[in-house]
Image (cartoon, rainbow, N blue to C red):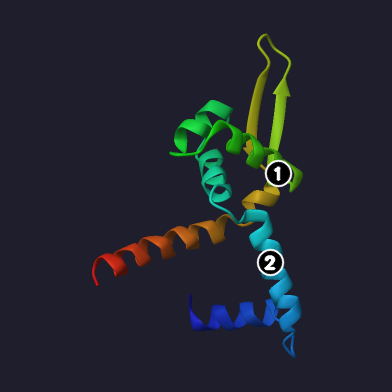
């Protein structure tokens, strides 16, 4: 991140004087909502066009049906995804990322970028 952009972001986000308790609480809230092993891969899967339960499940190696079901319910409760039920025969259920979820898309991209760089750094050391 460019220094000017970073300084602007620091001024926008952090209080002056700094409030460490507030900053820690904000970090903990973020980790609570998107933390864990499966939430970001689920969001990534849905944002890559997988809308049906089985599509999402197949796109994430190692996730169990039970875990995916639990995580989707929690993510819906936190307004990250929208569950749409179409009363056809059989009933069709689709999941999409909410606008709220898309609001941290840039953060996810930065995390992917950082993760790729980290893997290279470790591999080359």
Helix, strand or loop for disc 1: helix
Q: Which of marks 2 and 1 is nearer the N terminus?
A: 2
Considering depth in this image, is 58 or 112 the residue closer to the camera? 58
Residue 28 — which label? Answer: 2
Label 1 neighbour load within 10 Å: few <14, some 14-19, many 20+: some
Q: Which residue is drawn at 74% across and 46% down?
A: 79
Considering depth in this image, is 74 or 49 the residue closer to the camera? 74
The answer to whether 60 is drawn above or below residue 116 in the figure is above
The answer to whether 66 is drawn above or below residue 31 in the figure is above
Q: Where is residue 78 in the image (x, y as percent from the top left)?
A: 74, 48
Residue 47 — which label? Answer: none
Q: Position of residue 33 (x, y in %)?
A: 68, 55
Give the Cα separation between the discs numbered 2 and 1.
16 Å
**Residue 50 appears in the rendering:** no
The answer to whether 59 is drawn above or below residue 78 in the figure is above
Q: Quadrant of residue 75?
A: top right
Q: Which residue is drawn at 43% across and 65% down?
A: 114
Q: Which residue is drawn at 73% across and 71% down?
A: 25
The answer to whether 24 is drawn above or below residue 107 in the figure is below
Considering depth in this image, is 35 or 101 the residue closer to the camera? 35
Q: Residue at x 66, y 24 (%)?
A: 93
Q: Where is residue 16 in the image (x, y as percent from the top left)?
A: 74, 88
In the rendered image, the residue lying farthest to the bottom is: 17
| Residue at the disc numbered 1 | 74
Q: In which quarter of the image is residue 28?
A: bottom right
In the rendered image, the residue lying farthest to the top is: 89
- Is 104 displayed left or right of 121 in the figure? right
Q: Number of callouts in the render?
A: 2
**Residue 78 appears in the rendering:** yes
């Amino acid at each position: 991140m460019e220094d000017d952009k970073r300084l602007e972001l620091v001024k926008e986000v952090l209080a002056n004087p700094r409030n460490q308790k507030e900053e820690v609480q904000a970090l903990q809230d973020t980790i609570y909502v998107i933390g864990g092993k499966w939430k970001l891969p689920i969001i990534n899967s849905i944002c890559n066009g997988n809308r049906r339960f089985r599509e999402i499940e197949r796109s994430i190696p190692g996730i169990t049906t039970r875990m995916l079901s639990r995580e989707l319910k929690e993510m819906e409760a936190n307004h990250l995804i929208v569950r749409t039920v179409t009363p056809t025969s059989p009933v069709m259920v689709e999941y999409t990322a909410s606008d709220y979820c898309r609001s941290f898309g840039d953060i996810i991209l930065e995390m992917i970028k950082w993760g790729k760089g980290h893997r290279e750094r470790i591999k080359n050391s």
